Amino acid sequence: MENIINTIIGYVTEYGLRVVIAIVIFLVGRFIAKKVTNVLRKLMEKANWDPTLVKFLGNMIYILLLFVVLIITLQTLGIDTTSFIAILGAATLAIGFALKDNLSNFAAGVMLLIFRPFEVGHFIEAGGTSGVVEEIGVFNTKLRTGDNKLIYVPNSSIVGGNIVNYSAKDTRRIDLTIGVSYEDDLKKVKEELWKILNEDERILKDPAPTVAVAELADSSVNLVVRPWVKSSDYWPVYFDLLETIKTRFDEVGISIPYPQLDVHLKKEN
């Protein structure tokens, strides 16, 4: 009986000490994991990373560190964690294959949030569509089109192709091609175009606009009109210029050619 009691006391002493040590390791490890995660979050915030990305990566780092602490705690208790790690690894691999598209979008989202080729409020063309960026998510980016539709574009589609950011610069150049008749006086045409450009206060003086003959086409002399404007004024100035040019040319007698088809009827006896 005494031997049994001594054996029980020995087991309680040995495993009780292990349990106490394991609890201490877990509590200290969790404390360190929180501290490390907070430090990394502050570093990411200091680097001006997106808040969504900071929160997501912070949670992932904390979970990973906590998992390491849990493995060490179980080993302290004398539990074999080899099979546990193997099962977890196999499950992670299976989940990775099942969610490979989502993981691809996530990786692309991280790249967008870190390198910032565009920001919320920018007008972009990417992933086969164009619109104003309303939200950059971890898995997709939300665009608002000109006719007020919302389009959710997978981040992998954006990163995998060209990204055109129309709002990245403060100024943009309007490119117009204006055709006039061969009978019109080119000097007069250019004078009228310069007058139109100079009358619009939204058109910038620096860089200076360009008005030049670009092509002697089949039925017209084509001139390029290239003024610079603020990016926010691009479309208003674009539409106004086209209307003003047509109206002014009508007033001063400058003709804008258009394709015509002459049909000749031959009468047979």
Image (cartoon, rainbow, N blue to C red):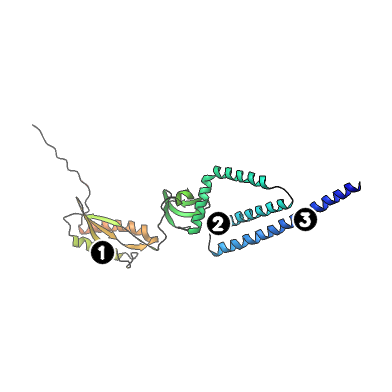
Instruction: Name the disc covering residue 20, or none.
Output: 3
User: Residue 93 appears at what percent x and percent y?
Assistant: 58, 44
Front in this rendered view, residue 22 or 194: 22
Q: Disc 1 to disc 3, how far (Cα)?
A: 87 Å
User: Residue 167 appears at what percent x and percent y?
Assistant: 41, 59
For label 2, the residue is 53
The nearer-to-camera label among 3 and 2 is 3
* Quadrant of res 61: bottom right
Q: What amino acid type should be assigned to the residue bearing mark 3? A: Val
Left or right relative to 191: residue 92: right
Q: Looking at the image, which residue sits at the far bottom? A: 206
User: Residue 108 appears at what percent x and percent y?
Assistant: 49, 52
Q: Looking at the image, which residue sits at the far top? A: 269
Q: What amino acid type should be assigned to the residue bearing mark 2? A: Leu
Q: Which SS class for mark 2?
A: helix
Q: Earlier in the sequence, mark 1 or mark 3?
A: 3
Q: What amino acid type should be assigned to the residue bearing mark 1? A: Trp
Left or right relative to 223: residue 108: right
The nearer-to-camera label among 1 and 3 is 3
Up-down relation of residue 196 to residue 100 (above or below):
below
Instruction: Name the disc covering residue 194, or none.
Output: 1
Q: Earlier in the sequence, mark 3 or mark 2?
A: 3
